[in-house]
């Protein structure tokens, strides 16, 4: 993968890497980075060099996850702390490394080392593998925003419908 260093400032669309480095390393400078696919030009990930995520990142994480990501928890994401899955500074402050956790039941025990979590599966699925001190594993996923639209007896998306004979007569 080729890395290209390009900088942009609000008052100037593009700057040289040297100028960007000068601005970034200036005392009191706060900066964010945007990973971009150099072939398509598409934005891939917005990040910051700070511990605290930006308000836009918090809003995106809450929208993506919908509820606390602790095992079995359904506390609304707006009532949760936003926590790093991999502790900062080892884990970056990016949306893919952040998730909502209920402070009392999941954030504090994780911080105390009583549980741990790591991303699992495809990044777009946002799966988290939790491990307890007793060695039990749990995998959690974000809230399904379409769950309420499904019939209770209908198969989940991607699940094959049951192959049962029909009891009603054919329509002829």
Image (cartoon, grey):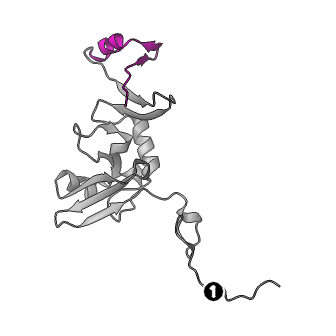
| Residue 113 coordinates in the image, percent (x, y) | 16, 54
* Label 1 Cα crowd, 10 Å radius (few <14 / some 14-19 / many 20+): few
Direction front: furthest residue: 1
| Residue 111 coordinates in the image, percent (x, y) | 20, 50
Q: Which residues are magenta?
A: 1-25
Vertical placement of 44 versus 97: above or below?
Answer: above
Which image quadrant for residue 164? bottom right
| Residue 142 coordinates in the image, percent (x, y) | 42, 56
Q: How many marks?
A: 1
Q: Is residue 20 magenta?
A: yes
Which image quadrant for residue 131? bottom left
Q: Which residue is mark 1?
A: 165
| Residue 81 coordinates in the image, percent (x, y) | 32, 48
Which image quadrant for residue 28? top left
Q: Quadrant of the C terminus?
A: bottom right
Q: Quadrant of the N terminus?
A: top left
Element type at marker 1? loop
Residue at 45% across, 58% down: 143
Residue at 44% across, 49% down: 124
Q: Looking at this view, is 90 or 28 the one in front? A: 90
Q: Is residue 163 left or right of residue 50?
A: right
Q: Looking at this view, is 108 or 143 the one in front? A: 143
């Amino acid at each position: 993968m080729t890395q290209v260093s390009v900088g942009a400032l609000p008052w100037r669309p593009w700057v040289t890497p040297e100028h960007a480095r000068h601005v970034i390393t200036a005392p009191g400078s706060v900066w964010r980075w945007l990973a971009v696919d150099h072939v398509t030009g598409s934005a891939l990930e917005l990040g910051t060099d700070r511990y605290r995520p930006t308000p836009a990142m918090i809003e995106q994480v809450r929208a993506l996850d919908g509820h606390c990501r602790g095992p079995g928890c359904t506390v609304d994401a707006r009532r949760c702390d936003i926590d790093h899955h991999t502790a900062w500074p080892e884990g970056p402050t990016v949306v893919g490394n952040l998730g909502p956790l209920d402070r009392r039941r999941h954030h504090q025990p994780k911080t105390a080392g009583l549980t741990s979590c790591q991303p699992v599966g495809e990044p777009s699925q946002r799966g988290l593998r939790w491990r307890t001190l007793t060695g039990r594993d749990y995998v959690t996923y974000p809230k399904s925003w379409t769950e309420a639209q499904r019939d209770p007896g209908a198969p989940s998306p991607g699940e094959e419908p049951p192959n049962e004979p029909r009891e009603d007569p054919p329509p002829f």
